[in-house]
Image (cartoon, coloured by chain):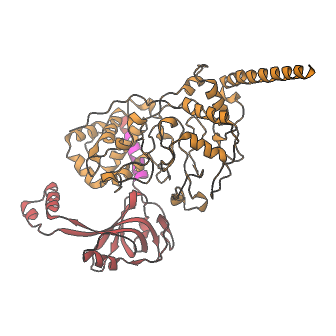
Chain colours: A red, B orange
């Protein structure tokens, strides 16, 4: 019983210290990771257009609006794209986190942008892992494309 | 004739005072540390006296925590925690190398060279903040990073948890540890952190000396101890039984890495890194956050010069150590370095 209590106490504590995005209001000018300037930042949608035409992954500064922040740790973000889709941002080396207040803010991100393609075979494999029905697995015929950003530094600009 | 007598007398005085000093140094340091000479510490610096290696804080709970520790040990050595299936925590924290990897910088996913040097996990329970730049505040939180980092183990926590759920042996281990086979990011990292808290240094000759074995350290090492505490000013940062103040400092080795600044966002923290424990320092090279220092001798030379380049740190100043003093200091660092405690790797669950 004592052990259980101890375990629960530790687990509770661990939960509190583990699973929290950093505090903060994500005010204008606040920065995370490496300190970046906004010089030379281009719209994310422009970069995505190049990638869609087959451009190689590129190191660049992009400007975009955050539409979602990982609610547990602040360890990933989703950025708005023009077609209603989103781009996934992860932090380089899992090195820094953003407060949930960053949702809705426009940011400049210094990092690498690439198009991540998940092949049909891979998608089918995941579907099998997830114990999807045969019909659902057979329905997978197109590779999935997702814009991925690995951020070295982020600054709030709007 | 008179001259000769004076020389003789002078030589005798020098001889006596030298041998007296040596003898008395051993005597002085054989007393309880509260009666040691005051260390050379600058005003405003908080410090603790050096002391015997502390046990793990879990030492008395090892029985009740046994199953969590065993689970953490398995996870720590399991390459299935990485995206490639090739890297475990132990890849960069090898028990045979005092829980370091002996490399300048750690090698991560598909040969990626990481940003910083892999520190030992010995005595890591003591640190208030983890990583060279202090960006994590608990070992539980820290454990998320290498697993999720694209440059280290290159996995994704949600996927990893899903994978582990398919390994029957882990259901058994989690059941034993937490009373439920449920695997989630929190109990996973709790187990790893709990295991890590049990890893401490081996007892060094310095510890044996403190415990009363007066012959455990040589004269040179003893002299090094005294220098370490006084003229060489080491205790301004490396103090307490684990030889670290748990703080962050820029001692002129930062290079282009901003270190703690990225966490604190304060200009005065540019280029600061966590003070590493000096326990087993001679076994945990190469040194500094970037692993660029391959010789402790050179580090001593550097600190002796007090040259901070463009950086500013009032704790670092020219020390004017003689050749022998530098040698003695190095000898003392040997007296606090030991091979690791023997360790048997776990059999991984299937």
Which residue lies most toward the right here? B2
The image shows residue B334 at horizontal and vertical percentages of: 54, 31
Q: Is residue A2 magenta?
A: no
> Is B204 on the left-hand or right-hand side of A143?
right
Residue B334 or B275: which is nearer the viewer? B334
Tell me if residue A35 comes above or below residue B60 in the rendering. below
Tell me if residue B33 comes above or below residue B255 in the rendering. above
The image shows residue B222 at horizontal and vertical percentages of: 64, 27
Residue A12 or B266: which is nearer the viewer? B266
Residue B12 or B197: which is nearer the viewer? B12
Which region shows up in magenta?
A7-18
Quarter of the image with the N terminus of chain A in it: top left
Q: Is residue A16 magenta?
A: yes
Please identify the dominant SS of the magenta region. helix
Q: How many marks?
A: 0
Please indicate, yes or no, whether residue B270 appears anywhere in the rendered image.
yes
Residue in view at x 25 percent, y 54 percent: B159
Q: Quadrant of residue A148?
A: bottom left
Tell me if residue B339 comes above or below residue B305 in the rendering. above
């Amino acid at each position: 019983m004592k052990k259980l209590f101890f375990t629960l106490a530790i687990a509770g504590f661990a939960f509190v210290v583990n699973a929290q995005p950093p505090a903060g209001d994500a005010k204008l000018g606040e920065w995370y990771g490496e300190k970046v300037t906004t010089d030379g930042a281009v719209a994310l949608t422009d970069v995505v257009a190049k990638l869609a035409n087959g451009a190689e992954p590129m190191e660049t500064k992009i400007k975009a609006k955050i539409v979602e922040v990982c609610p547990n740790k602040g360890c990933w973000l989703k950025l708005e794209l023009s077609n209603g889709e989103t781009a996934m941002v992860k932090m380089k080396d899992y090195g820094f986190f953003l407060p949930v207040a960053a949702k809705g803010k426009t940011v400049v991100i210094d990092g690498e942008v690439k198009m991540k393609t998940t092949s049909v075979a891979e998608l089918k494999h995941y579907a099998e892992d997830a114990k999807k029905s045969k019909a659902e697995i057979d329905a997978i015929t197109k590779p999935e494309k997702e814009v991925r950003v690995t951020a070295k530094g982020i600054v709030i600009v709007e | 004739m008179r001259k000769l007598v004076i020389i003789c007398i002078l030589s005798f005085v020098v001889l006596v005072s030298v041998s007296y000093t040596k003898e008395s140094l051993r005597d002085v340091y054989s007393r309880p540390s509260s009666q040691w000479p005051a260390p050379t510490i600058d005003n405003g610096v908080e410090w603790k006296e050096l002391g015997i290696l502390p046990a793990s804080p879990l030492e008395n709970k090892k029985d009740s925590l046994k199953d969590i520790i065993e689970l953490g040990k398995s996870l720590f050595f399991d390459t299935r925690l990485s995206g490639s299936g090739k890297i475990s925590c132990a890849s960069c924290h090898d028990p045979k190398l005092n829980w370091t990897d002996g490399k300048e910088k750690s090698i991560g996913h598909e040969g990626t060279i990481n940003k910083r040097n892999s520190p030992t996990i010995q005595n890591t329970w003591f640190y208030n903040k983890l990583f060279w730049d202090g960006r994590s505040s608990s070992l539980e939180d820290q454990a998320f990073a290498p697993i999720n980092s694209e440059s280290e183990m290159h996995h994704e926590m949600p996927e990893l948890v899903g994978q582990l759920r398919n390994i029957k042996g882990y259901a058994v281990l989690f059941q034993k540890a937490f009373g439920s086979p449920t695997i989630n990011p929190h109990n996973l990292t709790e187990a790893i952190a709990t295991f890590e808290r049990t890893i401490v240094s081996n007892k060094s000759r310095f510890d044996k000396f403190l415990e009363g074995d007066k012959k455990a350290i040589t004269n040179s090492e003893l002299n090094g101890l005294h220098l370490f505490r006084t003229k060489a000013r080491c205790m301004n940062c490396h103090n307490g039984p684990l030889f670290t103040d748990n703080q962050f400092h820029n001692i002129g080795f930062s290079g282009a890495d901003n270190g703690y600044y990225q966490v604190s966002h304060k200009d005065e923290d540019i280029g600061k890194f966590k003070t590493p424990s000096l326990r087993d320092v001679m076994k945990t090279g190469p040194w500094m956050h970037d692993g660029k220092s391959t010789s402790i001798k050179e580090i001593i030379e550097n600190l002796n010069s007090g040259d901070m380049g463009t950086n500013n740190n009032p704790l670092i100043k020219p020390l004017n150590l003689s050749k022998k003093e530098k040698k003695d200091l190095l000898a003392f660092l040997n007296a606090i370095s030991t091979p690791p405690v023997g360790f048997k790797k776990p059999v991984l669950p299937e």
